[in-house]
Amino acid sequence: MPYNLAWMNGTRKGLLGLAADTIDLTKRKFGPKNGPGGAVEFYSNAFNPRIILGSTELRKGVSDIRVFDPAGQSARVRIYADANGYNTGIPDEGNATKIIDIPICNGMGFVSAEYHELTPVISSIVAVEDIRQLPSGNELITKYIIRFADDADSWLVYAHHRSIEEAKSTPFRLQSVGTTRLEARYLFTGLLQVAHLSLDNRGHAGREALLDYTTGSYCAGVEINAQITGPYADSGEYQMRFKRAGQRKSPLLMYALPHHVKTFHNSTVANIHRVFKLPSPANGMMYGVIADTWRLKVESLPVEIGWLPLGQEGCASFPPDVLQQIHTVARIEVGQNLTLQTHANPSMYFSGKAYAKYAFLCYSTLHVLKDPGLTRLCLSRLKNDFALFAENRQKNKMVYDTTWGGIVSIRAFEGAEPSGDIDFGNYLYNDHHFHYSYHIQAAALIVQLDKDLGNSNTWFRGNREWVNSLLRDYANPSKEDRYFPVFRNFDWYHGHSWARGLLSCGDSKDEESSSEDLNSLYAQKLWGIAIDDRSMIARANLMLGILKVSTNEYMLMSKGNQNHPKEFVGNLVTGILAESKADHKTYFGSYKEYIQGIHMIPVTAMSPYIRSAEFCELEYQTYFSKGLHYGKSGADKVWAGIIEANRAIFDPKRSWEFFNSRVFDDTMIDGGTSRTWFMILSAGMGGLNINETCHIK
């Protein structure tokens, strides 16, 4: 967002209304320099409410605020000036007359407010140095420029009347009431818009002219349309169609993030106006685009990446001696106690990881080791154990929540404290795309193996609705589905998902595991392959293509990254990326293995699509070339396996040597994977050269 927004409830200097601010890079806060080369641990942005839209009728403790029409990229905030106390329920919209409706869209160029029978107030936490009425060239529009005292920051204000008669009988006139408050003289019903003009009160003529041109319209919603293109369906295009509302028919001014600009179609590039340049809180510089529709293209979709890793020449191949060594390990790992790993601690997350681990092991025994007997044994054990969750017999059963439209742990309705600590806050909608993707992957592998072994489709028919429900929970693509929201986690504007659910946070929504975000989309694709849903496969490929761009712009920071401060880029990964802050840490510990590794897990055939060999090598040399992941730092040993598996992306030979060691320490294998799988990855992943189909049917 080019504008930070917040509700001011009157506790700060009596300020009441919706506050807006832009990012001031000179006021960014930086953490301690404890990263590579002195990289700072975090950076965040100060929020200094520059413009607060309210009215003289608003009263602390009396006026109320509600959110309506929440969608993936938009919502409507309504402020009630009527005497409706807090927490008294949503007032009857038909009886509420004195209201302010504030439409909110990601990237909106104006902060807009529709006033109904109220006396507008514009206030600030800093003194107003100058306010002047400017000619607007339109009888329905009253225009002001406001300049603030501390840094000559300038904003434009546009008041749009409904009629010439109202503009003449009750004109919009602002008057100073003290140094930080401007009040209108009359009641106002119409559209009030404010927009940032300049930081230095100079060189803004071009911006002002374009703001004059686009004022009167605002974004009231966003529709996403997409198509797959190219002779091999390896390219895609998607459009963001912004629903225009307001009192004029001028095209919309919207701000684009760096990954948008990088993938804009030429027709949209022509509509970029670089005189509009505002820093985003944590995603680099944003540029203004004047258009109601954006067209974006994504090339090199991962159409050829399926279940198994790709080698340098296409599909991975394995020499006989390598297969023998892998086979020896696989026979042992098929015999592990899966029930102990899943039933004893029936967490959606950890149990899901265990099922996916075992499912990939089963698949490997058939398609790599060519041992159908071992596969049948493995698959039988997996189905029997998986039934605990598929039949909803686990301790914390899953239930459907009618309030938010989703599948959550029953703890949500058993008095659990809203701290988010239980199963990572699944019952508060935290991490659903992380948790459920592992179960979906396991189910996809079961269905595929049943087909490959010539089994009946009994398991599929008995469990497909359960799997589909998990996928619909976090990735439902259809607004016609009245049970689940559209794309709960994936944010089409930011190009990646958010993990935070209903828990509030001063830094807004966040995500710490870019790789499990990747895995949530990969799970969609694998389920689509298993059930032969071509639309699902195409959708997943497109989303993976978008994620590749956004992740490498915002979460994986190669040298020269321009979207984060130079003081922070040396960390190489963001750690926890919030909408307004980047913090090189995790929620579960501060060891470097944790922070870097949470952006690696799980390592799959899809990992090299997002994580380039060049980036992985730089990361390894920066953090792990001296063996920190061998336990010397104090971190859990399981991260050694993750880090060495990720090493296969740029150095498969050394990765193979690590996992094929005669004295291998099994405590270095994470509960979400197997040594067998890591051996297959390192033996088969010599790079990424997409030119064949690998086990996609």
Image (cartoon, grey):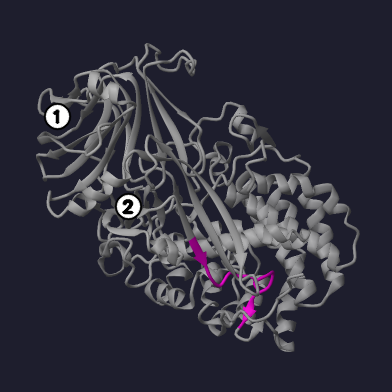
Badge 2 vs badge 1, beta-carbon distance below 8 Å = no
Could you tell me which residue is drawn at 26 percent across and 63 percent down?
A: 567
Q: Quadrant of residue 284?
A: bottom left
Q: Is residue 121 left or right of residue 366?
A: left
**As shown in the figure, which amino acid type bears the numbered disc 2?**
Ser
Q: Quadrant of residue 369?
A: bottom right
First reached walking from the N terminus: tag 2 or tag 1: 1
Q: Quadrant of the C terminus?
A: bottom right
Of residues 69 and 509, the one nearer the viewer is 69
* Residue 606 versus residue 415 in the image, above or below: below
Could you tell me which residue is drawn at 53 percent across and 70 percent down?
A: 299
In this view of the protein, can residue 130 be seen by the observer?
Answer: yes
Q: Is residue 545 left or right of residue 37?
A: right
Q: Quadrant of residue 405?
A: top right
Residue 309 located within the stretch drawn in magenta: yes
In this view of the protein, can residue 170 be seen by the observer?
Answer: no
- Any mark on residue 280, and which? 2
* Label 2 neighbour load within 10 Å: few <14, some 14-19, many 20+: many
Point out the stretch of residues depicted in magenta: 296-311
Percent x, y of residue 446:
78, 59
* Label 1 neighbour load within 10 Å: few <14, some 14-19, many 20+: some
Of residues 583 and 544, the one nearer the viewer is 544
Instruction: Tell me the element at label 2.
Output: loop
- Any mark on residue 99, and which? none
Percent x, y of residue 59:
29, 16
Residue at which label 1 appears:
180
Distance between mark 2 and mark 1 Cα atoms: 26 Å
Q: Is residue 664 left or right of residue 465?
A: left
Residue 676 located within the stretch drawn in magenta: no
**As shown in the figure, which amino acid type bears the numbered disc 1?**
Thr
